[in-house]
Amino acid sequence: MKSLPRVAVIGRPNVGKSTLFNRLVGRRVAIVDSTPGVTRDRLYGVVEWNGRAFGLIDTAGILSETVEKFDQEIQLQIEVAIEEADLLLFVVDALDGPTAEEEDLVRSVRRTGKPVVLAVNKIDTARKFPGTEFHRWGFDRLCPVSALQGTGTGDLLDIIIANLPESESRGEKIPEGALEIALIGRPNVGKSSLLNRLVGEERMVVSEVAGTTRDPVDSFFRYRGRELVLIDTAGLRKKMKTASGLDYYTLLRTISCIERCDVAVLLLDAREGASRQDMRIADMVVGNGKSLVLAMNKWDLIESKETNTAADIEKGIKADYPHLAHVPVVFISALTAQRMDRLLKLVVEVFDERQRRLPDEGLNEVLLEAVGRLNPPSAGGRKILISGCRQVGTSPPNFEIFTNFPDRIPEHYRRYLTNRIRDSFPFPGTPLRVSFTKRRAGGKKSPKSGKG
């Protein structure tokens, strides 16, 4: 598996970085406000454009002077983001023109030796053609945009993609067809102990001190004739939106490991149950299209276990987080090796389901039955017709549904059809992607319109 190249959005406060981040990622993630310095926490999203994908890192506004400790911490996070990035997206304000503060930033950016794309933002309100004043900085890649209206963002993405390195594999040679598993979770839940138990030797330093593991380490072993690669990651000590310094670096490394893996095993402490932080990590896995298994570790330390204790805990998790109802849960002990075989068997099953391809006939039967039970809502007084479905990809499974108004399908109806597919074809632990496409008369698929 390969890691996505990364782009860090940088610039001084209030030039529109978060608005541009939201525009490129395609959903409202970063907080947008006219007050300088609103973005305090680094955010991360995945952008797909013309068959390529990259990770986008939003950063706070860079300040020339950092008097307060809090501001110093923000600048440290920015430095980490820049260090991790393959390309820097430097956002400036067309209305203000080049500032002295940005002159300092230009010199710092040049010292990194990394490619820079200059996005001249707010062209919708500029009185003259933006960009000419910024040419004196000597950046070859310059693109006028309006993050608010979306003008020029397609051209900007073309420039970014053209200057990004290809996704890189790790230096180690991974056996062809190996199943790559990321062990993720909060500190001290037993990730390194689990890795040592599965691999069968003391490869990782195991300590009761939270945060012993800093960088991911790969371990290879075989299970029932299958090649498996375990990626152990550092624990995420703080909430992802408040991760700072070394914790922020750890977050980026964990994201990289999730991008690389096929299946993520999210390790939880059975004594504490699932926390909001755990579920944020789970959402990160699903959002990246990866498969997920929840492993309740330290089950041997639960003293008052009854017959239905495990079932009740699993039921509670899925009641609190219904979007993870398809994710299998296993109760283990890395210390005593309890249910180690069950865990690995689940991971392999989830991986195989992730690559499963369904026949069109079976899919269409499920789809027609679902539409018969609940018709899609009308679009501006016109009836929406669903004419068919097919699977167009795996890892994760990707389905294309044909309709006369693909842009008018509401989100709740997309979820409804997705759930009906999963009712018949469970795909345990794996997210499903469903898109809508228009077909011309005669059954031919119409070409999809590109993004603006």
Image (cartoon, rainbow, N blue to C red):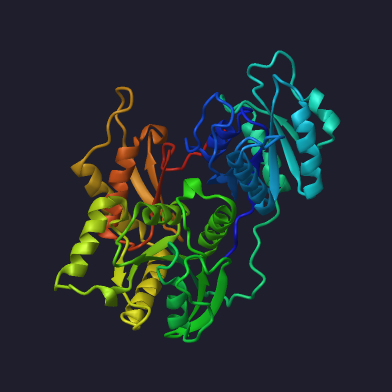
Q: Which of 370/294 is in front? A: 294
Give left or right: position of 90 versus 407: right
Instruction: Compare residues 233 and 366 and report the one nearer the observer.
Output: 233
443 sits left or right of 149 in the view = left
Instruction: Name the outermost residue toward the left.
Output: 307
On-image quarter of the N terminus: bottom right
Which residue sits furthest top?
A: 127
Write the residue at 81% across / 47% down: 111
| Residue 312, placed above or below residue 408 | below
Q: Is residue 450 visible?
A: no
Q: Quadrant of the C terminus?
A: top right
Q: Residue at x 33, y 63 (%)?
A: 428
Q: How many marks?
A: 0
For residue 338, above or below residue 415: below
Residue 339, percent from left and from top: 31, 80
Instruction: Kindly indicate the quadrant of the structure image that contains residue 108.
Output: top right
Residue at image coords 68%, 35%: 63
Given residues 268 and 131, the one toward you in this image is: 268
Asked where in the image residue 345 lies, by quadrant, the reply is bottom left
Q: Is residue 2 above or below residue 322?
A: below
Image location (x, y in percent) of residue 115:
76, 46
Judge from the rendering whether residue 357 lies leftward or rightward of residue 67; answer left or right: left
Please indicate whether residue 404 sits to the left or right of residue 55 in the image: left
Question: Is residue 160 in sight in this rendering?
Answer: yes
Residue at the (53%, 77%) spot, across then down: 205
